[in-house]
Amino acid sequence: MMSGSEMGSDKGMSPQSSEAEIYAFPCSLAQTRFWVLDQITPEDPALNVAVRWRLRGRLDVAVLQQALNAVIDRHEILRTSYRDIDGEPEQLVHSQALLQLPVIDLTLLPEPARQEEKERISRIEARKPFDLTSVPNLRATLLKVEAEEHIILVTVHHIASDGWSVGIIAHDMMEFYQARLRARAVHLPELPLQYADFAVWQNEWMKTDALKNERAYWTRQLAGFKRFDLATDKPREMRGAAPASIIGRQLPRALTDAISAMATAQGCTFFMVGAAALIGFLYRLGGGEDISVGTQIAGRDRVELNGIVGPFINTVPLRVKIEGNPSLRQLLDQMHDVIEGALLNQRMPIEDIIAIVKPERRSGRNPLFSVNLICQRSFIPTDERPELSLIDMPSVSPGALYDLNFFFVERPDGWRLSCEYDTSLYHAETVEAYLAGLQDLLGGFVADLDSPLRQAPSQAVSPALAEALAPPSPGPVDTHVGVEAQLADIWVDVLKVPILNHGDNFFALGGHSLSAFRMLSRVEKTFGKRISFDELHSHPTIGELTALLIGRPADDSKGAVVMQPHGSRTPIFALQDTFIYQELVNHLGTEQPFIAVPLPTFVEGGPEISHEQMVEHCVRTIEATRPNGPYILIGFCAAARLAVSVARRLIEKGHEIELFVTLDAWAPGYLARQPRWKGRLGACSYQIQSGLYYARCLVGGAEARRHALRRIRLFLGAVFGRRKPDDELDADMQMGNWLAEAGRSEEGTPLPMPILAIHNENMPLGYFLDKTMGWDALTSRGATMVPVAATHEELIRRTASRIIGDIIMATLRRQTDR
């Protein structure tokens, strides 16, 4: 080992270490990268490298544990911890770190339960985090599934390993096992270097001007870089570790043999063909003409590095600009040049490439790309020994570093195409369809290299994907694409998020009333056509809005805004404003259908519409969307009053209301049902207590002060301000006034539906007032009152919306259990 700084024995040691000396070294660029990621998202399981191997034969568990500890002893990086020195990581090499090998016996379980438990434990082990301040940063668990068959789960932190390293660990473990079992010398060459030596060399090398030419190449290659993103099935949320899963399919041997032969004939590699197919597939999905994906390069350009465990990989971007409708041959030629350039300039650290691009940073996301591609031969070939054989198994994903990570892996039985995907963004069916479409396009490369990229896919592709990949028709499409591109630019500028494709929903991307106003104002100036709020409600995707702008009719027959169409649960119908429910929809997830019902004031043009007409409009819209109940209704503030009449009419027509949810609303007709003296006392008490509450808010936090000042301004305006005539009010104010007046009375027998009344913790205020805010009188099933620590306005914001979503789901589960 090259010299490092020697430390005392009391620094940087884990509880299981007993060494007298620890040596400190600078970290490599890759180690620094993974250390920073660990600091940003502490203990992120996505930074784990998790593998599992099948061990067949008579196994001596004690000898296997000795073999694993011998591997740790051989490779210093596996007994290295890390510490923070003024914001920079330093690696501390320990002279010893012992691993314990727990054994879990599954042989007493019946076969189905055994398989299920094997998968469950594999997931737990893969996602268990590491503490980078202790050693070792490799762990293993042994599962006994048969008398002579075990599965070993091996997990290493990425700061100490890459894919190549996993193969080294497997090979060295088997060699140490055989040597100890037979009491012979181990047949492994002495390592010329340790990873810390490489880190020292890299730090010195980076101080030179060796990367001048590579920096110039990446500056040219990435000029005008625009991040590429693909549409997601689910809204993206700010979060920590991303959950992930892996879906794979074995490619037919005939197909992969044909690809290899074609690649050789064209002077290419299998990787180049696979990369060209992925780029072409993303283009055909509507991903735009400037497409960038990431890929990893081994980084072991010196023979003495081949047997060393450690993170040598570097990530580089593959950027392709597609113009027009090139042939597959032209795309492959372009991909050949891009990959060749990346390989020739692979030593430029990804951190320096990011510094060149200066992309917009988003928490929890790779700054350059959301799609990654890996193409490699299996690092772990089957290792058959007289006493014990090691067989590679498909991995369990510990977490997602990318939205979509496609990889081609060549195994003894052929090439396997897989995708690790972020399950918080994509459904499994979508990824299955992507893999089918990518395989189909690979077949196109073999069948006819001179065919255009946008040719119709074969029958191997699912109908939904075939529709997405269908070639555009001539003529009006160019206009459509041009308008859509201009509209997308406006959305990007207003929402400050990337627009993925024509299916993006304005509200799902974070749009709200103010941003909608700004966006529609820009649209009118750009296209000379006014789009109303109602039209945006009914046509919230970029494709639908584009169709409106160019005069093409869009499907609006039902009048509802389907904010979340997926899932088999009872649908939730929300009245009035689509904007306010988006955070709640996001939190309820993709198993809960959620439909908003815009009110006819927006679509039929008049506050003059009667209460009965309003109710009938809502009922028609609900039945047109879902002809049969049961339904869940939800209303915020005054809209909850209208929702009562809608619920009554639906029940009269024979539909079931599974749950009625109100958000910070008094029951309609509450005051009218009270004796006059009680109503007056209650109103007086309410005003006094409200005044005291807002006085407390004024001396509270900033948010509480804003809330109080807003309410005071509204009160002063109502008392001293000039009341505007209805024709001077905007649509939102007209609707609010209409709902307040229309819901003042509610008569009829109690309704046979449970009511969940969620209210801010300061309601109801005052004495002589019903603590159920009048809701208990409207139901024969009882009203459940749930306070939430939020102001009236905060109830529809992210934090409170998540709490409300949890309350709704818990209530529905309790009803189901009954």
Image (cartoon, rainbow, N blue to C red):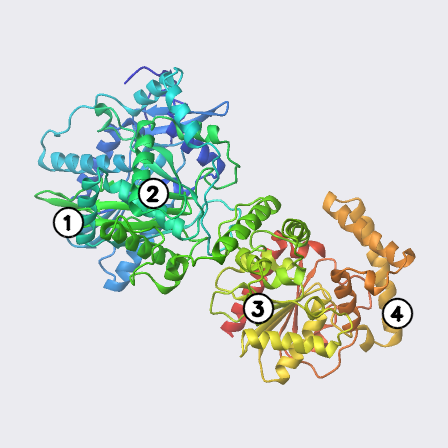
Q: Nearer the viewer, residue 121 or 275?
A: 275
Q: CA distance from mark 1 to mark 3?
A: 61 Å
* Number of residue marks: 4
Q: CA distance from mark 3 to mark 2?
A: 39 Å
Q: Which residue is mark 2?
A: 373
Amino acid type for the residue under numbered disc 3:
Asp
Q: Is residue 414 above or below residue 357?
A: below
Q: Which residue is mark 4?
A: 680
Q: Which numbered disc flags the more N-terminal residue, 4 or 2?
A: 2
Amino acid type for the residue under numbered disc 4:
Arg
Q: Which numbered disc flags the more N-terminal residue, 1 or 4?
A: 1
Q: Nearer the viewer, mark 1 or mark 2?
A: 2
Mark 2 and mark 1 in contact (Cβ < 8 Å)?
Answer: no
Mark 4 and mark 1 in contact (Cβ < 8 Å)?
Answer: no
Q: Which residue is mark 1?
A: 56
Q: Which numbered disc flags the more N-terminal residue, 3 or 2?
A: 2
